[in-house]
């Protein structure tokens, strides 16, 4: 019973205190469908795919690590689909694994010669698994019978964009959920509300700047935000910095290896109380575009959002 109590208290602390409930990314700007299901690339014929891996708070045993595979698929000039698979792990002796599979549907309307407004819906499944097999609590029947659950996820959003501006509001999880073990709640997912905003400034033919922000409100938790300033140099190199409120400073870099292949990296330097106990967070992303309809000549420079 004592071991059970320790385990429950540990999971509760990780799950329902002021901490991330969904995976967070420093390079979210390369896959904004994780934040807003209405996100659309607006590039017919180009299927954008990506792989992302994030190791958070290195130096702490059992710290979060996240893998993400995704694709944005324009079906027509009015419809885009995106598919996301996320594997998120936390914990050492008793690892907790979240698997997310989501499909987004975005419907794009033209409101002017330059502006488009997209309406998005998200549907998916979230699977949570607690694996106590390497701990002493495995002998307790409560953990043998109640260590996995699957929940439906539904989200919605709106997204306004032009060739150099975007703004959106969304909630990727409209259905809060909870996990109980032996009648005790050990995990709870609450509704997240996001606001995103960005603008690309052409400094010269070779230099572009993009200030942007993402604001996140988790129900019953304090408001938080990221503010970023990214630069695109010679349509090849990206350099940027971000600040995550009360949490970290972030350095970002990217390189367009070819017109359709890009690699990016970010490093988070913690400024919260956790900064004394970890060596920062690392994130790497690989992006690849499939030009199915040979539209590459239409897009003379890489998309900056």
Image: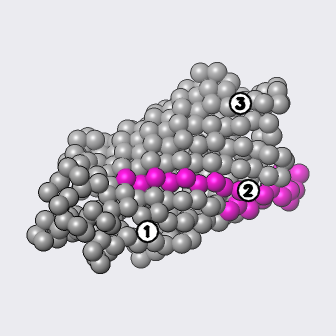
Which residue is at a point 43% across and 68% down the rendered structure image?
Answer: 189
Per the model, the C-alpha gap separating discs 3 and 2 is 20 Å
Return the residue at label 3. 290
Work out whether 37 lies above or below 65: below
Q: Secondary structure at mark 2?
A: strand
Which residue is at a point 71% across and 37% down the rendered structure image?
Answer: 47
- Whichever of callouts 3 and 2 sits on the residue coming sooner in the sequence is 2
Q: Give the percent coordinates (x, y) of residue 116.
A: 80, 55
Per the model, the C-alpha gap separating discs 1 and 2 is 24 Å
Q: Secondary structure at mark 1?
A: strand
Q: Which mark is residue 189?
A: 1
Judge left or right: residue 175 versus residue 54: right
- Region rendered in magenta: 97-121
Neighbour tally class for label 2: few under 14, some 14-19, many 20 plus, Cα within 10 Å:
many
Q: Is residue 270 visible?
A: no
Return the residue at label 2. 106
Q: Quadrant of the C terminus?
A: top right
Give yes or no for residue 120 being in the magenta stretch. Answer: yes
- Circles 3 and 2: CB atoms closer than 8 Å: no
Which residue is at a point 50% across and 66% down the rendered structure image?
Answer: 151
Which residue is at a point 80% across and 40% down the rendered structure image?
Answer: 44
- Front-most of 200 and 221? 221
- Front-most of 154 and 297? 154
Judge left or right: residue 144 versus residue 217: left
- Whichever of callouts 1 and 2 sits on the residue coming sooner in the sequence is 2
Give yes or no for residue 24 being in the magenta stretch. Answer: no
Per the model, the C-alpha gap separating discs 1 and 3 is 35 Å
Residue 137's image quarter?
bottom left
Q: Residue furthest top?
A: 258
């Amino acid at each position: 019973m004592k071991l059970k109590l320790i385990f429950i208290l540990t999971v509760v602390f990780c799950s329902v205190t002021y901490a991330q409930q969904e995976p967070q990314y420093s390079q979210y700007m390369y896959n904004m469908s994780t934040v807003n299901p209405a996100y659309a690339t607006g590039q017919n014929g180009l299927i954008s795919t990506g792989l992302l891996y994030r190791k958070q708070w290195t130096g702490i045993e059992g710290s979060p690590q996240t893998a993400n595979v995704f694709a944005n698929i324009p079906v027509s000039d009015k419809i885009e689909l995106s598919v996301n698979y996320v594997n998120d792990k936390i914990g050492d002796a008793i690892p907790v694994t979240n698997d997310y599979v989501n499909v987004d549907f975005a419907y794009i309307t033209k409101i002017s010669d330059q502006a488009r407004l997209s309406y998005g819906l998200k549907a998916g499944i979230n699977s949570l698994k607690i694996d106590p097999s390497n701990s002493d609590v495995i002998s307790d029947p409560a953990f043998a019978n109640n260590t996995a659950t699957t929940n439906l996820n539904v989200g919605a959003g709106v997204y306004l964009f032009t060739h150099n501006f975007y703004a959106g509001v969304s909630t990727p999880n409209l259905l809060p959920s909870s996990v109980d073990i032996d009648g005790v709640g050990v995990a709870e997912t609450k509704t997240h509300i996001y606001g995103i905003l960005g603008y690309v400034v052409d400094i010269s033919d070779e230099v572009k700047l993009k200030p942007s922000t993402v604001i996140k409100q988790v129900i019953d938790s304090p408001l938080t935000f990221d503010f970023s300033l990214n630069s695109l140099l010679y349509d090849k190199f990206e350099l940027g910095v971000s600040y995550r409120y009360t949490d970290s400073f972030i350095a970002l870099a990217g390189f367009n290896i070819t017109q359709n292949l890009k690699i990016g990296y970010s490093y988070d330097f913690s400024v919260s109380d956790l900064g004394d106990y970890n060596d920062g967070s690392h994130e790497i992303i690989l992006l690849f575009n499939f030009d199915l309809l040979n539209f590459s000549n239409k897009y003379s420079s890489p998309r900056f959002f």
